[in-house]
Amino acid sequence: MAQRLVRKICVRCKEEYEPDHSTLEKSGLLNLPKGTSLFRGRGCTYCNGIGYKGRMAIHEVLVITEEMRDVIYGEVTTSKIRHLAVANKYHDMHFDGMQKALAGITTLDEINRMTAKL
């Protein structure tokens, strides 16, 4: 299991916006339907002009099955382990964060900032 804390959008200055093409491309969300809205904080006195207030965790959990254990103990590449994990419904922190951004809890920028090196 792994987790990171990401900033939450301030509920008092939260605003809806339609992301541009480059933002969607950078986030790997080019397949979103046209007209999909996201949210961001405008900045207010409650959040000290930042647009974020509070934090929440994004997670990833890798369940080690018998098959996964056999693969790990064998001499295989990390791509083979990742392929097996994805086949077993594994979702990484970036995926969890993107779901939370699409739900309007945090922003794409925040998720990209916190998961850029993963």
Image: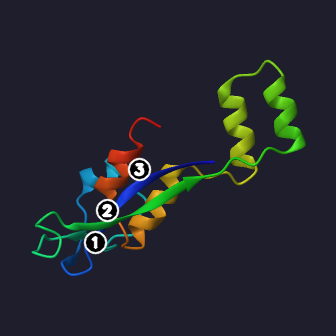
Label 3: which residue? 28
Nearer the observer, 111 or 86? 111
Horizontal relation, residue 29 to residue 49: left or right: right
Residue type beneath disc 1: Phe
Q: Nearer the viewer, mark 3 or mark 1?
A: 1
* Residue 63 on image: x %, y %: 75, 49
| Amino acid at the residue labelled 3 | Gly
Q: Earlier in the sequence, mark 3 or mark 1?
A: 3
The residue to which callout 2 is attached is 107
The amino acid type found where label 2 is placed reads Thr
The structure residue drawn at horizontal position 29% and vertical position 54%, both measured from the top left corner, is: 109
Q: Earlier in the sequence, mark 1 or mark 2?
A: 1
Identify the secondary structure beneath mark 2: loop
Q: Residue furthest bottom?
A: 12
Compared with residue 65, is residue 76 higher up or lower down, i.e. above or below? Answer: above
Q: Mark 3 or mark 2, which has the lower sequence index?
A: 3
Tell me the SS state at disc 3: loop
Mark 2 crowd level (few <14, some 14–19, many ≥20, 10 Å Cα): many
| Side of 103 relative to 95 (left or right) | left
Q: Do the numbered discs 1 and 2 sit on residues whose CB atoms are within 8 Å?
A: yes
Q: In x, y percent, where is residue 84?
A: 75, 40
